[in-house]
Image (cartoon, rainbow, N blue to C red):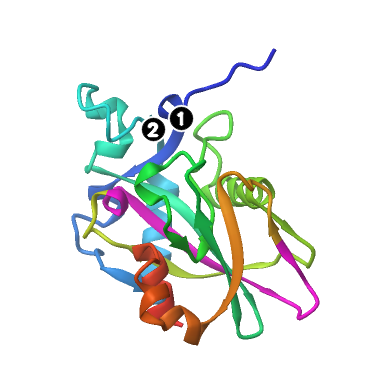
Amino acid sequence: MTEIIKKEDEIILVVSRKKLFNDEALTFQGVTSDKSLVADIMLNIDKYYKSMRRGSVNEVDVPVSRNAELNFDYKQPIPYIVIRRGDEYFVTQRLEGGGESRLHGKLSMGAGGHMNPLEKDFYAFKIVLAENTARELEEELDITGEIKIDTIGLINDDSEEVSRVHIGILGVIDLEDADEVAVRETEQLAGSWYTLDQLRDKEVYDRLENWGKIVVDMM
């Protein structure tokens, strides 16, 4: 019988903020596609990533050494994969059946999630990233077209607690016109196609997660 691990007890990847940003010398806010900056930060992730218990914002009595969600000395690298088909973008809505209550009703531009270690913390980060991204896409979505991910930048947003402990690795999948995407986790997510003009409409834009707003502003 498979043991069910609580979300809070999940072991995820983190990297020291101090080492990630070279004592804040590499810090940016929003999105960067500067190749040199992206390369430097990705190299630091590769050199210094480690594992930590995920924890929860509700576990205020748990030491931050065992609670990555409240440990602002660390960043959790998260793949954030945007799916584009012509002039449309696949957008998901987080439903009440999803586990992250802070994000219920929010719209997301990207697929992805927390990254888990591969057996031991000695694999090159690009391998860990590829394995985790493939798993997340497989769990969340059914994509009929070819899945080729182009990494185009990084996202950092320290303005909110939920994003302050994360750094996004921004990738794009470009699909053909005949390709389709559907959500697998129908109790947690709903999916729709939006054009950039629709995403920039205030009513829709205001429902986007901050990372989604950052991506829309970039595109």
Kind of residue indicated by mark 2:
Arg
- The location of residue 173, given as percent across then percent down, is 64, 70
- What residue is rendered at 22% in x and 42% in y? 73
Residue 193 among magenta residues:
no
Q: Which region is colored magenta?
A: 162-181
- Residues marked 2 and 1 touching at CB (< 8 Å): yes
Q: Is residue 15 left or right of residue 135?
A: left
Work out whether mark 2 precedes mark 1 in sequence or the reverse, and give the earlier one: 1
Choose top left, top right, bottom left or bottom right for residue 158.
bottom left
Quick one: quadrant of the N terminus?
Answer: top right
- What residue is rendered at 20% in x and 63% in y? 25
- Residue beneath disc 2: 54
- The location of residue 167, given as percent across then percent down, is 37, 55
Q: Nearer the viewer, mark 2 or mark 1?
A: 1
Q: Mark 1: few, some, or many residues within 10 Å (few <14, many ≥20)?
A: few
Name the residue nearer the viewer: 111 or 132.
Answer: 111
**Please, is residue 51 above or below residue 82 in the view?**
above
